[in-house]
Amino acid sequence: MVVRSAADRGLPTIVFRPGNMGGVGDVWNPSDFNFLVLQGCIEIGAAPKVDGWIMEMTPVDFAAKAIVKLARDSDNIGATFHVTNFANCRPATEYFDVIRKSGIPLDSCVRWRNGEPKS
């Protein structure tokens, strides 16, 4: 709203709507939703299986470069940009598989919720 109000008053503005910022290497925002989901799954030893769940993680360096490039072009004044890396996002099941392949056991949440023993 603040940016739109500034634009209505004649100030040059560009709106950037970044995706869910993923970490770079081992540096993550500790309150990021995807980070917390992955961390929570590791802690409880289980992961949900949700068909079609894509974990949108836009690398912060990707977003920063895109924003700088777009902001430098005066033709973009007044525009809104959704800065995401959605084309390269992966299904959540792939992230859980990587965790499993690293040696961390993750049972199915359905089995865990039903109190079935670990396999």
Image (cartoon, rainbow, N blue to C red):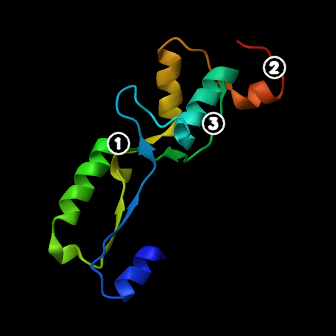
What residue is shown at x 38% (from left), y 88% (from top)? 8
For the residue carrying disc 3, how many other residues have a C-alpha within 10 Å: few (<14), some (14-19), or many (20+)?
A: few
Pick whichever of labels 1 and 2 is earlier in the sequence. 1
In this rendering, the label closer to the viewer, 1 or 2: 1
Pick whichever of labels 2 and 3 is earlier in the sequence. 3
Pick whichever of labels 1 and 3 is earlier in the sequence. 3
Q: Amino acid at mark 2?
A: Glu
Q: Is residue 71 left or right of residue 102?
A: left
Q: Position of residue 118 (x, y in %)?
A: 73, 14
Cα gap from disc 2 to disc 3, whole angstroms = 16 Å
Q: Position of residue 69 (x, y in %)?
A: 18, 59
Cα gap from disc 1 to disc 2, whole angstroms = 37 Å
What residue is shown at x 30% (from left), y 82% (from top)? 11
The residue wearing badge 1 is 59
Query: Which element is circle 2 on?
Result: loop
Q: Position of residue 49 (x, y in %)?
A: 63, 36
The residue wearing badge 2 is 116
Q: Position of residue 54 (x, y in %)?
A: 50, 46
What residue is shown at x 55% (from left), y 48% (from top)? 52
> Which sits in the foreground, 99 or 6?
6
Q: Amino acid at mark 3?
A: Lys
Query: Which element is circle 1 on?
Result: strand
User: In terms of image quadrants, where is residue 6?
Assistant: bottom left
The residue wearing badge 3 is 49
Q: Amino acid at mark 1?
A: Pro
Q: Is residue 54 left or right of residue 110?
A: left
